[in-house]
Image: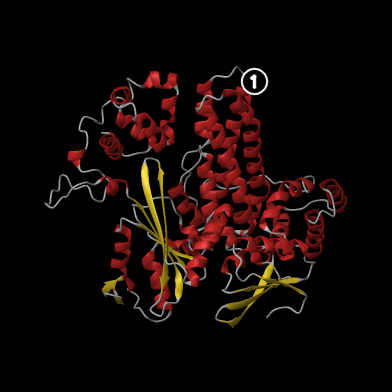
Amino acid sequence: MKRKINYKILDGRGKTEEFKECIVSALDEIKEGEGICVIKEFEPFPLYKMMENKGFDKQIDKIGEEEYHVWFFPKELKEIEMKQHLSLDDEKLQKIMEIKLQVFRNELTPKQAREIVNNSFESISPEEFAYGEQHMLNHGVDDDLMTEKMDDIIEIFNDVLVRNDLNLAEGHPILTYQKEADALEEILQKMENQLKQKFVKNPWLELYEKLSQINIHFSRKQNQLFSALEQRGFDRPSKVMWTFDNNVRDAIKSAFTLLQENKDMAFIKAQENVIRLVRDILLKEKEILYPTSLELISEEDFVAMRKSDDEIGYCLIEQPPQYTIAEEKHEIAEDLSSNNDLISDLSAVLNKHGLLTKDASNEVLDVSMGKLKLEQINLIFKHLQVDLSYVDENDIVKFYSDTKHRVFPRSAGVIGREVQNCHPRESVETVEEIIAAFRSGEQDQAEFWLEIGGKFIYIIYNAVRDDEGKFRGVLEMMQDVTRIRSLKGSQKLLNWEHNAIGNNEMPKEQLSSDITAKMTIGTLLQKYPYLKEFLIDFNPMFKKLNNPIVFKTMKNIASIDMVAARAGIGVDDLIDKLNKQVADHK
């Protein structure tokens, strides 16, 4: 129910893009404790998430078929879910939040706030600091402002923030993140040393090849760690730290481009910013993210997390050992990780309602067209040559297909997350626009396509509706259609030798046959020089081909099967992809 406060009325009927700017301006002008009433000829779904992020609840009144009144009012201050998992001092938390709010409202300069903090606290734990960040949303501090001021806030508390060394067993996901951070710091130190020497391109190419692996570190953190924290009520890393990750990634990519384009002076000038950004994000992780994660996330959840980490991979370190805990807890962890198994997941739900016997995999179910066992349903999803994901009507990720044809890595941690938290903040608006258009019935489909790593990827989103037309969620379908785009003519006769369906291969008669596993890289690129660019885009390991010294050394020694093994790629798969590039180039 809407609160009895003063509201500013904004009539947006007939207005489109400029009306959103009116909303933003109104938010800057209203006083604390006041609200906004929006009048539109349709329900303004796109505004809901923006206003929620700014700390507002809403009430929707449908006046007529083409008139909606939506009342936005400040959320009542409420207990933050993450506090249930922590032992915190309420009085201390209140003081911390008051100081932060004064900084966010420009009532205190960072220097003044730091002096107050140093005089008020002997120490502040990372989880106390993190709880304050989560609570800011209750006071109208949105993600944009949080991101803008985050560096100032950390600096204000720098002198009193507790820093403890990690004491974790091998294989623990947090220890793995820290080992990756240590490896990245070694790269940064080598970069600083290289800056003191005369510029030579080749050493920088090798350093940036390694530094670019930080994207693997980010991907695992965003898909695995952020998801576990959201389940404990701490979603600020998903909404704010992801932006910092992207800033780092973009800075590295831009500098690497300057290096490849031989813009030496501009590249050298960019290094100070790259090194600063990488160190900054690693420090934020070490001082706030990791200690808070250890307080919020259970050991059982870390065991389950470790099992999905391998799918995404690791940055500059070898694959760590499996992480296990006491036997009795380990059995619990096995149960918690069952999201990865569609049979177990469906069985648990159906058994709960008494719809299945204990042997659920053999129970026959009436599906829309036919009768299938759960085992058969699972096998169908595993063998579909399309990567599927389903988000329900409440924007919660419920399912993705466990298929070997997956285009991008996924992990079980995505299940149960708000779909908005599975994307960087900069692209959330597009996600919400698609969902809003599907929910309102304005659209039923959105499609995208992109070229990446020598592949052509097709992505299509469909609105899911029940028999009555009610919106029930979004189905995402993604497929590598590189081979499909290349097909010509007809194939009407069965030919097992030439049939490449299921492997994304070209028909053999269209492929060159002179590329073999024992062919050297030098011979390959002498005959097909354009394959060099493909290999570099295909796998980071092949960026060494840009290094003249390394290439000169390896060109007559390294065979295709040797470099495939080094890059972790099946030699047959690599040869098939090379042959396809040759065929496409003809």
For the point 75% across and 50% down, the residue is 153
Q: Position of residue 516 (x, y in %)?
A: 24, 30
The image quarter in which residue 467 lies: bottom left
For the point 80% across and 66% down, the residue is 31
Kind of residue at disc 1:
Lys
**Left or right placement of residue 318 versus residue 237 in this view:** left
Q: Position of residue 78 (x, y in %)?
A: 71, 71
For this rendering, which residue is in front, 467 or 224? Answer: 467
For the point 61% across and 56% down, the residue is 239
Local crowd at mark 1 within 10 Å, few (<14), some, or many (≥20)? few
The image quarter in which residue 352 lies: bottom left
Q: Mark 1 points at which residue?
A: 196
Q: Single out the residue that lies furthest toward the front.
A: 14
Image quarter of the C terminus: top left
Q: Is residue 560 above or below residue 340?
A: above
Q: Is residue 527 above or below residue 121?
A: above
**Left or right placement of residue 554 versus residue 318 in this view:** left
For this rendering, which residue is in front, 192 or 324? Answer: 192
Q: How is the image coloured?
A: secondary structure
Q: Is residue 531 above or below residue 323?
A: above
For the point 52% across and 22% down, the residue is 201
Q: In this view, does 88 lie above or below 370?
A: above
Q: Visible in this render: residue 299?
A: no
The image quarter in which residue 9 lies: bottom right
Image quarter of the N terminus: bottom right
Q: Where is residue 441 in the image (x, y as percent from the top left)?
A: 46, 72
Q: Where is residue 253 in the image (x, y as percent from the top left)?
A: 54, 37
